[in-house]
Amino acid sequence: MSPLARAARLRLMAFDVDGVLTDGRLYFGADGEAMKAFHVRDGQGIKLLQAAGIEVALLTARTSPIVARRAQELGIARVWQGQADKWSGLLALCAAVGCAAQDCGYMGDDWPDLPVLTRVGFAAAVADAVPEVKAVAHWVSSCAGGCGAARELAEFVLRAQGRFETLLSQYRDGAHA
Amino acid sequence: MSPLARAARLRLMAFDVDGVLTDGRLYFGADGEAMKAFHVRDGQGIKLLQAAGIEVALLTARTSPIVARRAQELGIARVWQGQADKWSGLLALCAAVGCAAQDCGYMGDDWPDLPVLTRVGFAAAVADAVPEVKAVAHWVSSCAGGCGAARELAEFVLRAQGRFETLLSQYRDGAHA
Amino acid sequence: MSPLARAARLRLMAFDVDGVLTDGRLYFGADGEAMKAFHVRDGQGIKLLQAAGIEVALLTARTSPIVARRAQELGIARVWQGQADKWSGLLALCAAVGCAAQDCGYMGDDWPDLPVLTRVGFAAAVADAVPEVKAVAHWVSSCAGGCGAARELAEFVLRAQGRFETLLSQYRDGAHA
Amino acid sequence: MSPLARAARLRLMAFDVDGVLTDGRLYFGADGEAMKAFHVRDGQGIKLLQAAGIEVALLTARTSPIVARRAQELGIARVWQGQADKWSGLLALCAAVGCAAQDCGYMGDDWPDLPVLTRVGFAAAVADAVPEVKAVAHWVSSCAGGCGAARELAEFVLRAQGRFETLLSQYRDGAHA
């Protein structure tokens, strides 16, 4: 099946956080992680996926209140943190949403993402993912993590589902506001 | 009308914030957005526009006390935040300043900026704006957002209005201090 | 001896922090250093070294609670800060671990690292190290400090020790979780 | 006089801060500027200048306790902030140090630096300075501000004064610690 066909049937899109929605930098202070840098245009991409009726989720091995806070701002209800075993996490997530793993996408950057990427319907990698991750991905963004990779993925999926032009028109007309 | 002619009649220049005056990074902590990274030479560009008698404004869909704080430091009195409908925001801004939309410029980077960019007199995009925004812009900077794009725009406008050399001479002479 | 042979006998790998595990930026607030930006994939590299039985240590001239906090998260027990005389620090570290300097590696970026780099068994430099450091290194990463240099080193060492494929398989199978 | 000859007689080296010792980013929080990002290898360059007996100073139009804090860590006693009229600031600085403006260097990036750069003995610009600044500089770094420009300048000056190799030897021998 082509990447486009895989993206066309997507109902759930899950993202790793560090290195995918950020550029991988962990900003530490004396009390532990102080900040994460998300990208405004990645956030816009996530809003577009949601507007097209695709469920967006975050699935990450680390745990941080920062992720919960950003998810809240973007209206992402499904945030699964502390999932060292990401494949079990993804199965539970699919069950909660009520979709098959074949209708689920996942975007990752590193070895802990491999068990998920080798099994979901649409496996995506950021441009700066490690080679072993890019090797198993159905689709690789040209942007690096935290710098537009999630936005690029969102547009690829919207085009695959034939929703890109309609959404763009709504924005041109100011109808989304 | 050429971009230069459009810039020559500019009386009000409005900027989007995230992705235009910043590089798009949203620095989140556990309590929400903690910081924005503005650029010192963009700030200098805004001061030059003001010195040339052009009103500078900020017009943004998100709301942040950080934006208000930076605007205060730059002496930008007109800060319109929380404007999901940016075109209505711009019309209100023009009314407040007392100028027509044809004498107003706007610099943006993403889809929510389209209703404004397709209607103002001088539509500008940052180098890393999405293609749909660059396609409707009269002028595109060679610098990315947050890395000199606003400064580059300021210099283009100052040259269009024949003010560049005079201002530069004042700085050379230390007369601005 | 080839760099590969040097990496093959490695039992202890020590890293400088600023400019090696970070990109060299010191984020200062009014009260001094507020943050350091580590990279998530460098952290994963350190975990892989540890999984292969190699002791990981931090050895730095500056002193910061931020370094202690990041080390704690990565399970790095041996953190030697405030070591202006890095060679003495490394000798003490080797004694504590119980290995010879010939079985020890060190990754650095600047002049204060020279006394260590000219004496350890495996001397590594980041891509953006100063020329005098790269000149004495047995191995130079292609990634800059804080942007994957430590991860690249970890993979080089794991391959040298014949552990790369086994560890990768465990990650593919989700057996590491 | 050649740039090398100018650097050879340097007794006082003053740096602008934003855009020269930082990459120009102003990290703003809700209460104003929260952080500046300095570079560890620029700091090392400043220490090398001091070790060679050259007085280092900071001269900046903005005012920030962050600058004072970083200066303290680097042992820079002469910190002149809030100097909108930088030339007057530099003259006062020269008087305090007891040297002529011809024996003084200054590194800048933008228009407010022009009155100083056109008058000091050794005028330096960062690689990403605006063209008008680079046009009057005797020497332009190949590194951008905040990313090694000050270090590169320090090494140029040390070579011009014939101090580079001696200092390097001391570091190689660990004699600086």
Image (tube, coloured by chain):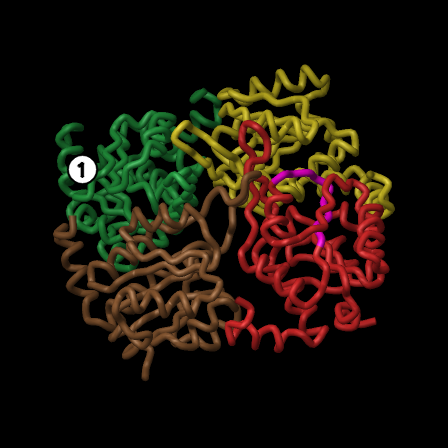
Chain colours: A red, B brown, C yellow, D green
**Residue B8 screen position, x and y as percent:** 25, 74
Q: What stretch is highlighted in magenta?
A: A57-65
**Residue A102 screen position, x and y as percent:** 84, 62
D21 with respect to C26 (left or right): left
Residue C125 falls inside the magenta stretch: no
Q: Which of C75 and A154 is in front in this view?
A: A154
Occupied quadrant, residue D43: top left
Q: Is residue A130 visible?
A: no
The residue that appears at 32% across and 28% down in the rendered structure is D50
Kind of residue sitting beneath label 1:
Asp
The residue that appears at 22% across and 33% down in the rendered structure is D11
SS at mark 1 in the image? helix
Label 1 belongs to which residue? D103
**Residue D47 screen position, x and y as percent:** 37, 29
User: Number of callouts in the render?
Assistant: 1
User: In the displayed structure, would residue A21 be above or below residue C176?
Assistant: below
| Residues packed near mark 1 inside 10 Å, few (<14), some (14 to 19) or many (20 plus) | some
B48 with respect to A71 (left or right): left
User: In the displayed structure, would residue B43 be above or below residue B111?
Assistant: above
Q: Which of C95 and A61 is in front in this view?
A: A61
For the C terminus of chain D, the image quarter is: top left
The chain carrying label 1 is D
**Residue A115 screen position, x and y as percent:** 83, 50
User: In the displayed structure, would residue A90 be above or below residue C153?
Assistant: below
Occupied quadrant, residue B160: bottom left
Q: Is residue C32 visible?
A: yes
A130 with respect to D87 (left or right): right
The residue that appears at 46% across and 52% down in the rendered structure is B63
Q: Which of C101 and A84 is in front in this view?
A: A84
The residue that appears at 64% across and 74% down in the rendered structure is A164
